[in-house]
Amino acid sequence: MTLKELGWNDDLEKAHAAFAGKGWIPARLIRETVINYGAFIKGGDEIDVVLCGRVWHEAACDADLPAVGDWVMIELGDENHPSVIRAMLPRRTCFSRKMPGNSSQAQVIGANIDIVTVVTDAGADFNIRRMERYFMLIGRSGAKALVLVNKSDLLPIEQSQAAAAEIAALWDGASVHVTSAVSGQGLKVLKKYIKKGTTMCIVGSSGVGKSTLVNQLYGDDWQWTGEVNEITGKGRHTTTSRELVPLRNGGMLIDNPGMREIQMWTDESTLRDSFADVTALAADCKFSDCSHRKDAKCAIRAAVEAGTLDAGRYENFLNLENEIAALKKRSEKRQMAVERWAKRNSVKARNLADRIQLEKDDRGDV
Ligand SMILES: Nc1nc2c(ncn2[C@@H]2O[C@H](COP(=O)(O)OP(=O)(O)OP(=O)(O)O)[C@@H](O)[C@H]2O)c(=O)[nH]1
Ligand SMILES: [Zn+2]
């Protein structure tokens, strides 16, 4: 595998010239654990690397630390010394969850992602507000957005087309396609966008078809069996857990637990957003820490009494935190069920994130 196939470009070529003469080599991070990183170097070799103290200290916050997808300069080690990340190269894009006003809480999910694919459908999953949330995250990352309105085989085609049109009208920067994973149409669209050197990630609600599409991509381009270790008989991926996976015909997918959580955050923000009108009323409450229950001069309760705010809606607003907690629980429960199912049937987990977790469980990692 060449550096170009890993996403190396002219900007990186220029940036890395600053370190000429030091004997360091470029590498792309493909895995992150509590103790070290995994990296691809020229030729496609996979090595373990550790962070040097200087890079650590120079980082103003967690978001400045190297993350999966980042390009770094490495000093290769030997039997007695680990390979070390000596410098980070500039990020082209950075997909992160950033708490407003608190940069130290930013969490980088993937760096240098070119395309974020959002999978949805025109039926039960369709929610234009949630799509807006995804677009906010993607827009801020600098990546391009690709939206698949999937499962079109299950609905009248006009319905999927109407949903696609509504989504496309939200943001010029998004490419929107009506697809079906069953007919192979979804795979066809994905392959059109994943070119050599392109890094993609796939997000979306539970059950919309992400794993089906990813498995089709892997099945088509990426052969697990080819990498079975002859001595242990185990796939190489039972000992390594890549979060950045090169596809055989070019392009890469980033899939890690953080990717999976994006759906949760967007659902949470969408839920909060849907009560924006009620939250706005709170500005007129007498006390800034008003609980909107029994407190004096509560503007929200006043609105209910005046009949301008529906009592049922007020109840739902009070239950907002409960609803969010329930949302989190549902998604955790589902994840656990998937893992149990995969173990019980001793089959490969359905997608990379599940596999990573299963491998961790097998090794007894926390
Ligand atoms: N009819 C139809 N079924 C689909 C399509 N795409 C996926 N499915 C089915 O929908 C179900 C859920 O698909 P998954 O790929 O597991 O969904 P997911 O988005 O990965 O869900 P999580 O793993 O929970 O995040 C499976 O039974 C798929 O076979 C499609 O385009 N058409
Ligand atoms: Zn109040």
Image (cartoon, rainbow, N blue to C red):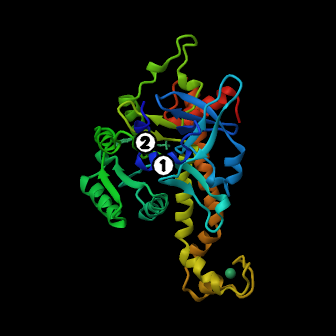
Front residue of 61 and 109: 61
Q: Residue at x 70, y 37 (%)?
A: 35
Give neighbour class at mark 2: few <14, some 14-19, many 20+ (Cα, 10 Å).
many
Q: Position of residue 168 (x, y in %)?
A: 32, 62
Give neighbour class at mark 1: few <14, some 14-19, many 20+ (Cα, 10 Å).
many
Q: Quadrant of the N terminus?
A: top left
Q: Which residue is mark 1?
A: 112
Q: Dot 2 lies on which element?
A: loop
Which image quadrant is residue 211 in? Answer: top left
Q: Position of residue 20 (x, y in %)?
A: 54, 42
Q: Which residue is mark 2?
A: 7
Residue 202 appears in the picture as rendered: no
Q: Quadrant of the C terminus?
A: top right
Q: Is residue 333 above or below residue 125?
A: above
Kind of residue indicated by mark 2: Gly
Residue 364 appears in the picture as rendered: yes
Q: Position of residue 82 (x, y in %)?
A: 68, 30
Which image quadrant is residue 284 in? Answer: bottom right
Contact? badges 1 and 2 (CB < 8 Å):
yes
